[in-house]
Image (spheres, helix red, strand yellow):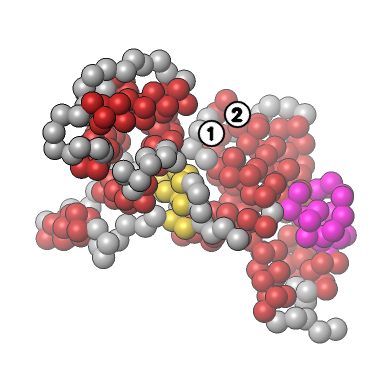
Amino acid sequence: MSSIKEIEITTDNSKLFSQREAFNKRWNIIDNSEKKEEFKNRCLTILDDEFHKHSPNHGVFSDERCEYINDYCLEISSNLGIIIKANNFDNFAHKELYSYLKKLKMDDIQDYRFFLFFLQLTLSYDFNGFISNDTLALRFAEAMKICNINAKILKGNDSFDIYPCDVEFLDKPLITDLLSWLNNYPDTKNLFSKAIKTERTSKNCRNIVDDLRVCLELFLKKILNNNKSLENQKSEIGKYFSDNDISKEISNMYTLLIDYYAKYNNQHAKHDNSVVEIEIDYLIYLTGSFIRFVMLIEEQKVRVPIEK
C-alpha cells in the first residue's frame, strides 16, 4: 500500500528557516504575506543550482550537461504546452524555459498556478539519478515556507503533487491524511484529488462540485456495499451508524447534511451553473469530513471488532 506524506519544513530540518525565525523573533517581525515573486526566483535559483552541482561534468563546460538540461527543458515545456528551442548553453539560467518562467507575473492567478504546475512537473521528472527529486522537494518546500506560500508538497510512492493549503488545522486530517487513507479507494481518491489541486479556477467550479459529489457517492457505495445514488443512501447510512453504535444525533446530523449536500449539487451544478467560487473550499472540507468520519469508524472496527 502506498502512503502519502507532506514535505514539512521546520526549524529542525531547515537551517535557513531556523535563522529567519530567530531573526524575526529578535526584531519582533510578524509577516504572513505571500511573497510570490521571491518564491519564483528562489525556486528557479534552486533548480539552476541543482543542475550546476549534480549534472554531468560539474564545474567545466560540458556538451553532455548542455544536452542533459536541454532534454529536461524540452520535455517540461512540451508538458506545459509552450514552444522553446534548445541552445548550446550548459546552465539552466541561460535556457529559454528559464527566460519564459522569469517573465511570469506571479500576482496573476493564472501565471501563479502555471508556475506551481511547472514545479510539480519538475518534481516528477526522471533526472536519471543526477539530481535527487527528494532534495528538490525539500528545497522547494523550504522556499514555500520562507515566502509564506499557501501551498504544500505531498509525496506518494512514485510522485509529488502540489496542493493549496489555506487552513493548516483542517488540511492535515481532511486532505493529507485522507488522501493517504483513500489509497484503497482509487476512484474516490482520484476525484477528491482532482477537485483540490491548484489548477482549479472559477471557470470549472461546476465540475469541481460535481467531482466532489461523485467522489462521495462512490465512496459510500463501496462502504455500504450497494449501488444507490447519494440521494437514496439515507436509510443505509442510518443503519450503518446504528450498527456501529453512533449516536442518533450524529446520525441524523450526518444524513441531514448529506441531503442538503445532494440538493446543492442538483440545484447549482447538475441542473445549473451557479456555483460561487467562495463556496468551493467549504464543500471540499465538508466532503472530506463526510469521508473521514466513516474512515474513523472503519479503523475502529479493525482495531476493536464490535460485538453484538
Q: Which of 19 and 124 is in front in this view?
A: 124
Residue 70 among those drawn in magenta? no
- Decide if residue 284 is on the left or right side of residue 222: left
At a point 39% along the width and 37% down the height, the residue shown is 122
- Relative image position of residue 222 (x, y in whole percent): 79, 56
Which quadrant, please, contains the N terminus?
bottom right
Disc 1 crowd rating (10 Å Cα; few below 14, some 14-19, many 20+) is some
Residue 117 is left or right of residue 280, and the answer is left
Amino acid beneath label 1: Arg
* Residue 263 lies in quadrant: top right
Identify the residue at image location x=59%, y=40%.
194
Q: Mark 1 points at which residue?
A: 200
* Residue 242 can be seen, yes or no: yes
Quarter-wise, where is residue 57 in the image? top left
Give the number of the disc on residue 204: 2
Per the image, label 2 sits on a secondary structure element best described as helix
